[in-house]
Image (cartoon, grey):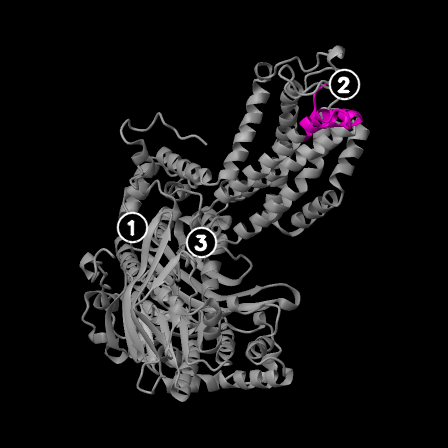
């Protein structure tokens, strides 16, 4: 039994102040082995993206324990965390600075962490994500959505992290581009021995990418299941079953059932 | 807005500027500048504004060459002469050549505009970005201070300062600057607030960027264009306030050829000798207008939200 | 006069061309289809021209777009020949459009009920009380459980799914014969999406409406729509029955289907679409 790469235990988070203070995450727990790919699925407002933001350090006032490679997140220096965990965001148009060249975007992490050999590393990563060095001196607005997402992935890989947090990385893209990006991510995972935590509303994407997954609803994990269980459509929770059915095809009868439950 | 011609290969400069095969950071910058320039040239009014400002700068820089007379040399025998071949814009009550005085006055106007912008831009930008980025109490305190300055009528505050510090060009600049920074700060804060919550800032935080780095490398380049545009549009107001102070005798002191002061001095002869007031007055009008036109063009260029 | 066998909408050789200082861009190149009282899907990737078709029919394109067609007949009238005034009448009364995000289509300062009632009063002036009655009935018709309560809510107080239902209620007030829905459910969660689709489905079945369903979601269209047009680069490359989508023949359609991950049919790699110039039935446009 290998030690977990990422362990989340009883993670809770409140957002807002006074009367508008709301519980966003309520005792979320899961763990990932090194090299594993784990999915978080759920509908909007279920808190799935918030989990990523807590692990990434974008929210700090959560309670519970997050352990990276065996060590609690709180005990790690910030720079250390950056070298271990990186994130890819949903919107490729909003996650790249509009006035920075690709070169600037990719070199920045290296400069911050005092890593040398900037030119070679930037060229190599651009090749690795299938863009090539000729994209180096362009601005984000000169690239398509898929190309931008490749740059965002390249940026996340600059510091050679072990864990990649993927927040709906393909939901803003066309299906044919989605296939390219998902293939690229799968290749990178085996090549670089990465651990993935993927958030998506699309169960088919999660089934394709992840070994196991958790279904979230209203800040809690409803059920954790394996890829096989998802594929066979045999979950335990009725909510999961409804979600799987609703994702498969349009069904007039199911719609009636859902409307009554709503 | 010039492109770096020297680094281009000899053949096909236009190719170098428009190709997709960008091989260096310098080429990327040159392309950006070039396409910006092309876009700007498509706006005739802005180009006219830019030309007038250029003319203003040239006449200020080469005033002794451009002017036909000494701006403070008096010639009482030739007082209040209408425009003629010898005195293009006529002469004033002391026989000074109005054309030459306007040319030299461009120096004073430009000095005021540049000094005010240099003081106001960084202060407004810094206060606004800090308030927007840090938030919380810092934001509240900084914004209340801004509100206090904003609630004074600018000319009256400038008047009070000029009166307290004594009349003169430097004091006029300080007085105008005091009232001109709050709108810039507000603008910078509003921009910062929208930028702060964007994904690219989150991504930069994730790679370990310090707050200072976020502020200066990420927020600043996005705030800067709108602040520059705003400053440019403010220049018309600055020129008018400076002229107003000059008109009231609290700006540049005689005999220096400040446009406002010239208008003020000429007012007594307005009925008989129209040119004494009209010429410096038109200069104020045209230059203010030019800054506005230029600022509008710059906004279309720098701010993607306003472009088609 | 239209008889029951005539199609509701008949489009032949629809073209949309954008002319600007940067050059000429053909967004739609010769699209033809007939629509009866059925659910017709137009699918394609971004830039395929699918949304442009919907907007061209309603003349909602900017002035730089030049729209031409050999035929564009709706209930016996030629849509492209109509004056702007007559078109407004058609747009309000006979053809309705539902857009992707209800958040941007609703007025944030009016309660949703008032907005639905307002839509009624535009077509039937006077009669405030009657407008309210109709609005409540319409909200109930889109399966809103407590219409009285929802009537008094502001747009920011309702969920995305509810907002889309309110939009549909508003569109139904003038009793249209054709609904053009442009990605109406892509901003919604799967379970909510299902319910909104059910409402549209029932409308087509019960009132005999025609529905043009513009979407990028092949999986959804397959089970929801009667017929599917697959668009690529401004042209319809293939037309199929929804249920037979998996048997698509055109390499582009097949490529799209193959690149789509599907539940229970996992492959090690997704196949990647390669675009070929010969897919353009008509090379350079006329």
Camera-nearest label, 2 or 1? 2
Residue B210 placement (x, y as % from top left): 51, 43
Judging by the rendered image, the residue that carries numbered circle 1 is: A129
Q: Which residue corresponds to the image point at 27% horizontal and 50% vertical from the top-left?
A: A130
Q: How far apart are marks 2 and 3 (CA)?
A: 63 Å
Q: In front: B78, or B150?
A: B78
Chain at tag 3 = A
Q: What element carries label 3?
A: loop
Say if residue A201 shows up in the picture.
no
Q: Which residue corresponds to the image point at 60% horizontal and 83% vertical from the top-left?
A: C131
3 or 1: tag closer to the N-terminus: 3
Judging by the rendered image, the residue that carries numbered circle 2 is: B93
Q: Is residue B51 magenta?
A: no
Relative height, residue B249 to residue A81 (above, below): above
Camera-nearest label, 3 or 1? 3
Discs 2 and 3 carry the same chain letter: no
Mark 3: few/some/many CA within 10 Å (<14, 14-19, 20+): some
Q: Where does the magenta region start and end?
A: B256-281
């Amino acid at each position: 039994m290998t030690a977990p790469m990422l362990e989340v235990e009883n993670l809770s988070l409140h957002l807002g102040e006074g009367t508008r203070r709301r519980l966003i995450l309520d005792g979320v727990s899961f763990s990932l082995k090194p090299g594993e790919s784990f999915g978080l699925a759920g509908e909007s407002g279920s808190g799935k993206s918030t989990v990523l933001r807590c692990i990434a350090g974008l929210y700090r006032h959560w309670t519970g324990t997050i352990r990276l490679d065996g060590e609690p997140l709180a005990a790690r220096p910030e720079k250390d965390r950056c070298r271990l965990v990186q994130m890819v965001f949903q919107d490729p148009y909003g996650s790249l600075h509009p006035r920075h060249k690709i070169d600037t975007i990719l070199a920045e992490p290296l400069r911050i962490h005092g890593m040398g050999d900037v030119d070679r590393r930037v060229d190599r990563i651009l090749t690795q994500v299938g863009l090539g060095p000729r994209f180096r001196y362009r601005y984000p607005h000169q690239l398509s959505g898929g190309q931008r997402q490749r740059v965002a992935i390249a940026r996340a890989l600059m510091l050679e992290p072990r864990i990649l947090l993927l927040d709906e990385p393909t939901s803003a893209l066309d299906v044919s581009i989605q296939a390219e990006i998902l293939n690229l991510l799968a290749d990178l995972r085996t090549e670089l021995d990465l651990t993935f935590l993927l958030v998506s509303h699309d169960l088919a994407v999660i089934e394709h990418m992840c070994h196991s997954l958790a279904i979230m609803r209203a800040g809690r994990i409803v059920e954790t299941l394996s890829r096989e269980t998802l594929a066979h459509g045999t979950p335990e929770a009725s909510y999961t079953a409804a979600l799987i059915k609703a994702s498969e095809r349009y069904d007039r009868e199911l719609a009636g059932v859902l409307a009554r439950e709503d | 807005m010039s492109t770096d011609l020297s680094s281009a290969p000899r053949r096909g400069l236009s190719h170098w500027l428009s190709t997709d095969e960008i091989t260096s950071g310098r080429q990327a910058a040159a392309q950006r500048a070039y396409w910006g320039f092309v876009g700007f040239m498509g706006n005739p009014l802005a180009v006219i504004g830019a030309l007038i400002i250029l003319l203003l700068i040239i006449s200020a820089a080469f005033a002794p060459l451009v002017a036909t007379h000494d701006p403070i040399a008096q010639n009482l025998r030739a007082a209040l002469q209408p425009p003629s071949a010898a005195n293009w814009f006529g002469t004033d009550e002391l026989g000074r050549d109005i054309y030459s005085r306007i040319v030299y006055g461009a120096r004073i106007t430009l000095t005021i505009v540049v000094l005010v912008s240099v003081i106001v831009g960084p202060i407004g930008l810094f206060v606004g970005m800090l308030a927007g980025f840090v938030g919380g109490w810092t934001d509240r305190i900084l914004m209340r201070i801004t509100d206090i300055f904003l609630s004074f009528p600018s000319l009256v505050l400038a008047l009070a300062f000029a009166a307290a510090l004594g009349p003169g060009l430097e004091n006029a600049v300080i007085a105008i600057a005091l009232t001109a920074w709050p709108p810039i700060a507000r603008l910078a804060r509003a921009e910062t607030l929208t930028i702060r919550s964007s994904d690219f800032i989150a991504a930069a935080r994730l790679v370990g960027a310090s707050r200072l780095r976020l502020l200066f490398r990420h927020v600043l380049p996005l705030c800067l264009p709108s602040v520059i545009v705003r400053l440019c549009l403010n220049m018309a107001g600055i020129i008018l306030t400076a002229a107003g102070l000059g008109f009231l005798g609290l700006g540049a002191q005689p005999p220096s050829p400040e446009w406002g002061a010239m208008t003020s001095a000429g007012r007594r002869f307005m009925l008989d000798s129209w040119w004494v007031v009209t010429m410096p007055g038109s200069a104020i009008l045209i230059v203010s207008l030019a800054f506005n036109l230029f600022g509008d063009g710059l906004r279309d260029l720098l701010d993607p939200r306003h472009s088609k | 006069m239209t008889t029951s066998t005539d199609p509701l909408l008949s489009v032949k050789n629809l073209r949309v061309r954008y002319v600007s200082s940067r050059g000429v861009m053909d967004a739609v190149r010769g699209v033809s289809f007939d629509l009866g009282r059925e659910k017709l899907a137009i699918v394609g990737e971004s830039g395929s021209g699918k949304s442009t078709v919907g907007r061209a029919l309603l003349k909602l394109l900017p002035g730089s777009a030049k729209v031409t067609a050999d035929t564009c007949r709706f209930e016996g009238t030629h849509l492209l020949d109509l004056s702007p005034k007559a078109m407004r009448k058609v747009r309000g009364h006979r053809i309705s459009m539902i857009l992707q995000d209800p958040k941007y289509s609703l007025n944030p300062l009016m309660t949703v009920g008032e907005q639905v009632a307002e839509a009624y009063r535009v077509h039937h002036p006077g009669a405030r009380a009657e407008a309210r009655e109709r609005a409540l009935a319409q909200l109930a018709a889109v399966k809103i459980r407590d219409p009285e309560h929802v009537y008094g809510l502001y747009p920011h107080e309702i969920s995305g799914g509810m907002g889309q239902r309110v939009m549909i209620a508003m569109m139904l007030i003038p009793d249209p014969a054709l609904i053009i829905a442009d990605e109406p459910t892509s901003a919604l969660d799967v379970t909510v999406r299902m319910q909104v689709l059910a409402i549209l489905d029932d409308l087509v079945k019960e009132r005999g409406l025609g529905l043009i369903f513009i979407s990028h979601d092949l999986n959804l269209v397959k089970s929801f729509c009667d017929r599917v047009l697959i668009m690529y680069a401004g042209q319809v490359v293939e037309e199929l029955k929804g249920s037979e989508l998996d048997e698509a023949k055109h390499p582009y359609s097949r490529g799209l289907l193959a690149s789509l991950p599907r539940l229970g049919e996992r492959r090690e790699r997704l196949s990647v679409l390669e675009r070929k110039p010969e897919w353009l039935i008509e090379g350079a446009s006329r």
